[in-house]
Image (cartoon, grey):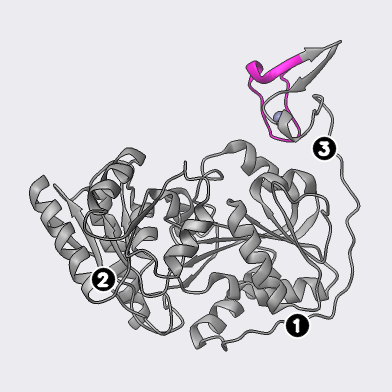
Amino acid sequence: MEKRCLRCGNTEERYFYQDGGTWYCRRCVNFGRLDVGEYPSQKAYTHRRCHCDYHLTYPLTQQQLRCQKEILYHLFNHRDVLVYAACGAGKTELVMECIKQYLNNGRKVGFAISRRQVVLEIRERMQEAFPMLCVIAVCEGSTDVTDGDLIICTMHQLYRYYHTFDLLIMDEVDAFPYRGNDMLRHIAEDACIGQKVYLTATPDADMREQAAKGKLPIVKLFQRPHGYPLIVPEVVCGFSWYQHLRLYRFLKQNVRDQKQVLLFMPTIAAARCYQRWLSVFFPCACITSQTADKDTVIDAFHQHRYDVLLCTTVLERGITIRGVNVVVFHADHKVFQEASLIQMIGRVGRSIEIPSGDGLFLCKRKTEDIRNCIAAIQKMNAEETV
Ligand SMILES: [Zn+2]
C-alpha cells in the first residue's frame, strides 16, 4: 500500500523511516514527528466575534475601493482570489476590509508571508490599523504565543494551524521559499478551511493560466496611490567597458543630485568586488544573504550615510527607500528573471513625496526576461489609464 504523509502530502518512499514498526515522514519532521496515517493535531484556537474596524492614515483611492469590493464579492461567493497588484500599489490595505468582515462574523483569519522580516512589518501595520485587536506575529524566534485575533505568520509556521483559518491571506506567493515548494503548499492548503487570497506583484505562469481559464478570479490594481505610472527602466546594451562607464556616470549624476542608488548585482562575489571599486568614488555599503546585520546597514542607508547600496536579489522585495533610484548591473545574468526585474525596478517611485525616479538596466544583450519585464510594466501602465 502506498504510504502518504497527511501533513506534507509526501508519497516518496525515500522520505519514510521506520521506528519500531511505525513509519513516519522525514520530509516534514522539522515540524514535529508525524506517523504515517496520523492526522496533524488540530488545536482549538479561539473564535471571538469582534466588532472591529480599521483606520488608515491615508484614505483609499477609488481604485483601491473598487478592488476591495471585488475581493469581497469573490470571497462571499466562496471562491479564492488572486490579487495582482503592482509594487507599491498598497496590497496590504486592500485586504483590510475582508479581514474586518470575517472577524466581525466570528471567523478565524491568518496572514502568511514568506519572509520573517515582513511578518514583523505587517504585524505592526495591522496593529496600527486595527488598534482594538490582538495582532500576533508567529515566526522563527517568536512562537511563544500562537493564538490571537489576527495571526500573521511565515509560510513555515502554517503547520501549527491545521484546519484553522476561514480566511487565509498569502502574500508573495511567487517568492522563495513558497514558490514551487510542494510541502509548504500542502501545509497551507490544510491550514485553510475557507477561502484564500493570494497577493502578488508578479504572478507566476501557473497562476496566470488558472486566472485566464477562469478557475481563479483575479483582481488587478496597477495604480499606485499617488497616481503616477510605474517606472519603465532604460535598457543600455554594450560591451563590458561601456557598461562600467554608464554605471559610473549614472552614479555620479545621482550623487550630484543628492539621490541615493540601489545597485543590484548578480552574485555575492560581484557585489563585494564592486563595493571595493566604487568605494574609491562614493560612500558605499553592501548587503548580501551573508550580511549578518542587514538592518543596521539599511538603517544607515535610510539616514543617508551612504550614496550607493550594492546588493544581491536578497533585497529585491519588501524594501522601501524614499526617492531611491535603481541600477541592475549585468541585467542579462540568468539570476535576474522577469519577476526579479519587476520587483527591483518596483523599488523606484514608491513614496508620495517622490513618486517618480530613474531605473537603468545594464547588459550585453536584451534577454527574454528583460523584454518580458518591460512589456509587463508597460501593460500595467496602459491598463491603468483606460
Ligand atoms: Zn510529511
Q: The N terminus appears in which quarter of the rendering?
A: top right
Q: Residues within 10 Å of mark 3 (few under 14, many from 20)?
A: many
Question: Is residue 162 visible from the viewing direction of this image?
Answer: no
Work out whether 310 lies above or below 98. above
Q: Amino acid at mark 1?
A: Asp
Q: Alpha-carbon distance for marks 2 and 1?
A: 38 Å
Q: Residue at x 14, y 63 (%)?
A: 249
Q: Residue at x 33, y 63 (%)?
A: 345
Q: Alpha-carbon distance for marks 1 and 3?
A: 34 Å
Q: What is the quadrant of residue 376 in the picture? A: bottom left
User: Helix, strand, or loop for circle 3?
Assistant: loop
User: Helix, strand, or loop for circle 2?
Assistant: loop
**First of labels 2, 3 by sequence position:** 3
Q: Position of residue 261 (x, y in %)?
A: 31, 64
Left/right of residue 30 with respect to residue 228 in the rendered view:
right
**First of labels 2, 1 by sequence position:** 1
Numbered tag placed on residue 358 in the rendering: 2
Q: Residues within 10 Å of mark 2 (few under 14, many from 20)?
A: some
Q: Amino acid at mark 2?
A: Asp
Q: Magenta stretch?
A: 1-17
Q: The C terminus appears in which quarter of the rendering?
A: bottom left
Q: Position of residue 267 (x, y in %)?
A: 33, 41
Q: Position of residue 369 (x, y in %)?
A: 28, 50
**First of labels 1, 3 by sequence position:** 3
Q: Alpha-carbon distance for marks 2 and 3?
A: 50 Å
Mark 3, residue position: 40
Mark 1, residue position: 53
Q: Nearer the viewer, mark 2 or mark 3?
A: 2
Work out whether 68 lies above or below 244. below
Work out whether 378 lies above or below 274. below
Q: What is the quadrant of residue 196 in the picture? A: bottom right
